[in-house]
Image (cartoon, rainbow, N blue to C red):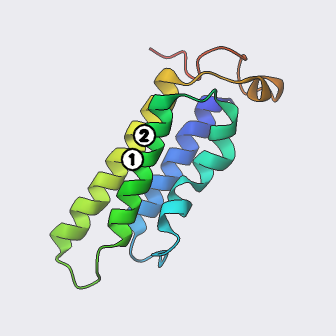
């Protein structure tokens, strides 16, 4: 498994949580649960990058919006908030895959070549 695989897995976990909300019952914890795998498995293995951090912030904002949707709101409101969150997760995934640089920690763990791109697929 390399870092690109971890990025994809973290994004998939976040999308599943978003799709399952509100059934998941994570209202207060939703923003942190959405980025939990990304922060645990990815963030500490890539060099800091403003674009990646901006997309991470965008995910948090979208997750807060979804968590703030009231149970009695129309289905269209919930669906739109969910769609915004899934889109934000997709953009974060793509930002890391396109712009992420593997750091030394990840290189030492065999997740990629330190200083190389997270994904060589272009």
Q: What residue is drawn where x is 32% and y is 46%? A: 87
Q: Residue furthest bottom?
A: 72
Q: Nearer the viewer, residue 19 or 60?
A: 60
Image quadrant where residue 78 sits:
bottom left
Image quadrant where residue 119 sits:
top right
Q: Quadrant of the N terminus?
A: top right
Q: Which mark is residue 45?
A: none
Q: Do the CB atoms of the residues marked 2 and 1 lie less than 8 Å apart?
A: yes
In the image, residue 22 sits, relative to residue 39, either above or below, namely below
In the image, residue 101 sits, relative to residue 56, either above or below, namely above
Q: Nearer the viewer, residue 50 or 118?
A: 50
Percent x, y of residue 106: 75, 29
Q: What residue is drawn where x is 45% and y is 75%? A: 27
**Crowd rating for badge 2 (residues with CA inside 10 Å; few <14, some 14–19, many 20+):** many
Percent x, y of residue 57: 44, 47
The residue that label 2 is drawn on is 55
- Side (left or right) of 81 relative to 48: left
- Side (left or right) of 116 relative to 54: right
Q: Residue furthest front?
A: 50
Which element is circle 1 on?
helix
Which element is circle 2 on?
helix
- Side (left or right) of 46 relative to 53: right
Q: What residue is drawn where x is 50% and y is 58%? A: 34
Measure the alpha-carbon separation of dots 2 and 1.
5 Å
The residue that label 1 is drawn on is 58
Percent x, y of residue 41: 67, 44
Q: What residue is drawn where x is 44% and y is 14%? A: 122
In the image, residue 105 sits, relative to residue 7, either above or below, namely above
Q: Nearer the viewer, residue 113 or 104?
A: 104
**Crowd rating for badge 1 (residues with CA inside 10 Å; few <14, some 14–19, many 20+):** some
Percent x, y of residue 40: 68, 48
């Amino acid at each position: 498994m390399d870092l690109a695989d971890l990025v994809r897995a973290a994004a998939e976990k976040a999308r599943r949580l978003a799709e399952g909300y509100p059934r998941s019952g994570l209202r207060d914890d939703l923003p942190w649960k959405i980025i939990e795998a990304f922060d645990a498995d990815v963030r500490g293995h890539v060099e800091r990058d403003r674009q990646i951090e901006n997309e991470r912030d965008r995910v948090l904002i979208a997750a807060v919006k979804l968590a703030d949707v009231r149970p009695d709101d129309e289905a269209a409101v919930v669906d739109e908030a969910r769609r915004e969150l899934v889109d934000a997760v997709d953009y974060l995934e793509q930002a890391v895959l396109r712009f992420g640089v593997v750091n030394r920690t990840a290189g030492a763990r065999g997740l990629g070549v330190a200083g190389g791109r997270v994904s060589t697929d272009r």
